Amino acid sequence: KDEELYRFDRDISEKARKSNRELQRQSSSSDLVINPYDTREVKYNNGVKYIELKEGDSFKSISDIFSLKAWELPHYNDLPANASLDKYSILYIEAKRRNAHPDHKTHVVKNGETMHEISQQYGVRLKRLYYFNNMEEGSQPENGERLNLRKRLRQ
């Protein structure tokens, strides 16, 4: 049975033609550059995805780029939700590992290094670092101290 659908292909209403003419008259701006991917290079550390931070980055801006929920970035990076990212150089965009890569069994603490910095350096969850080294959460290691990155210290 012929439904005569071809009639709709040719019949353009006056309203549609007028709308098209108005759109053609409007000029477009060549100054606007749309970059849907925001060209953020994703790198890997210990098999975990991270990005290098740029000036002005925030949890919100990065969450929007990678379609993450508001709680995810602070959680993945062991940071409070209201933390300023100015003093950090990298941000993990997925959960860090429970322990370091097999090539990194221990870490010797350098002057002024914090547990958070070491956690970020090796892509290991901060709570696990405290657990591996029988340390109280929030405490910091001594300069020259050897930290376990893969398994718990024997007491």
Image (cartoon, helix red, strand yellow):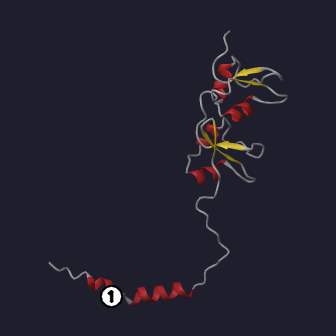
Query: Residue under circle 1?
Result: 11
Farthest-out residue, right: 111
Quadrant location, the N terminus: bottom left
Q: Residues within 10 Å of mark 1 (few under 14, many from 20)?
A: few
In which image quadrant can residue 8 be found? bottom left
Farthest-out residue, top: 155
Against 24, residue 136 (above or below) is above
Residue 3 rendering spot, x and y as whole percentages = 19, 79
In which image quadrant can residue 48 be found? top right
Residue 54 rendering spot, x and y as whole percentages = 73, 52
Q: Please tell me how many numbered marks the rendered image carries.
A: 1
Viewer-proximal residue, 121 or 85? 121
Residue 59 rendering spot, x and y as whole percentages = 65, 47
Secondary structure, mark 1, is: loop
Viewer-proximal residue, 118 or 3? 118
Against 124, residue 58 (above or below) is below
Residue at left offset 63%, top offset 19%:
151
Against 79, residue 51 (above or below) is below
Residue at left offset 64%, top offset 69%:
33
> What's under tag 1, amino acid-wise?
Asp
Residue at left offset 47%, top offset 85%:
20
Farthest-out residue, front: 103
Residue 95 rendering spot, x and y as whole percentages = 58, 37
Viewer-proximal residue, 54 or 59? 54
Residue at left offset 64%, top offset 26%:
127
Left of 25 or right of it: where is 50? right
In which image quadrant can residue 155 be found? top right
Against 85, residue 134 (above or below) is above
